[in-house]
Amino acid sequence: MELIKVIEQHAPFVALIQLNRPKELNAINRQLMEELRDTLLHLDKNDNVRVIILTGNDQAFAAGADIKQMADKSAIDMVMVDQFSTWDQIRKTKKPIIAAVSGFALGGGCELAMTCDMIIASETAKFGQPEIKLGTIPGAGGTQRLTKAIGKVKAMELILTGRFISAEEALSDGLVNKVVPIEMYLFEATQLAKEIAQMSPVAVQLAKEAVNRSFETVLDEGLAFERKNFYLTFASEDQKEGMKAFIEKRKPEYKGK
Ligand code: DAK
């Protein structure tokens, strides 16, 4: 059974990936993660895709890694399975990924959403890192990304208590971009994706890379990296087209070259 559904042309230049394990609230098992990795690799190479939306269903984005699959594992089993190489692919994807989240985004589900580049949430979304209640801690970036997103004291509270936060709280904490009624979250994510898909794909990828760099390095290095990517945009036809179109008072036509 396929645990991922993909619509490559959900909108012009926008692909949609849907996690598809509804009975288990999209709990993330190895198969699902491997399918997600393969799909992202494939979409990253497809010139007709410029932005990717990742979603679940109304009830759950993902309620975490599959507890039943993990419960009996030893530390060495976890090392040998090396799930990080599959999780790392999300981070390595060059095209922007928008998480469209409704219902539960817990544990690995919250980490998956945070690994995406932007998050549009429905009013029903619930975010949390409840691993502590299972006697473990976040393992796919939760202690780092949640802390960077919402600050130390709040992240500490959520990670040490396992408490869930509502979409509204996530918005005021800076974890999500926007909260909309449940009927609208996919539409809203699609609108955002379409807006970004109109930009130069070259500039979008270089900008994403530079923003992500700010998480990984000190300011001096980050600024040098940004500068390099900025210069690089001037090697693209898209930059020439973008500036020419501005001067000629017309809409640019970007080719991703
Ligand atoms: N794993 C497996 N099954 C799950 C699940 C999960 N995380 N979450 C829900 N399910 C299953 C339930 O077992 C149930 O299945 P049946 O019993 O019907 O067979 C079905 O989904 C419906 O769930 P409930 O009956 O519990 O539904 P409720 O509405 O009553 O409750 C809930 C919803 C989301 C509050 C509850 O299901 C819940 O607390 N779920 C667990 C949430 C959780 O603790 N999540 C964190 C898991 S630990 C790593 C990467 C990532 C991670 C670790 C390592 N590496 C790269 C190494 C991440 C770890 C985690 O996420």
Image (cartoon, grey):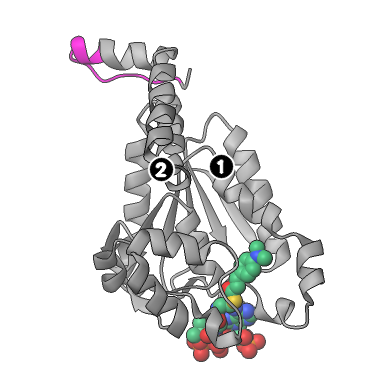
Q: Which residue is mark 2?
A: 214
Q: Residues within 10 Å of mark 1 (few under 14, many from 20)?
A: some
Provide residue 79's location: percent of width, then percent of height. Answer: 77, 64
Residue type at tag 2: Ser
Q: Main secondary structure of the magenta part?
A: loop
* Residue at x-position 63% and y-position 55%: 87
Q: Quadrant of the N terminus?
A: bottom right
Magenta-span inclusion, residue 198: no
Q: Position of residue 64 (x, y in %)?
A: 57, 73
Which residues lie in the magenta part?
Answer: 245-255
Disc 2 crowd rating (10 Å Cα; few below 14, some 14-19, many 20+) is some
Q: Where is residue 245 drawn, in percent x and y?
A: 26, 14
Quadrant in which residue 229 is drawn: top left
Does residue 21 appear in the picture of this structure? no
Residue tagged by mark 1? 93
Judge left or right: residue 48 versus residue 77: left
Q: Is residue 103 above or below residue 209?
A: below
Please tell me whether mark 1 or mark 2 is closer to you in this view.
Answer: 2
Q: Provide the secondary structure element on which disc 1 rests.
A: loop
95 or 141, nearer to the observer = 141
Using the numbered discs, state the Cα–Cα distance from disc 1 to disc 2 in whole angstroms.
17 Å
Give, as a three-letter code, the residue at label 1: Thr
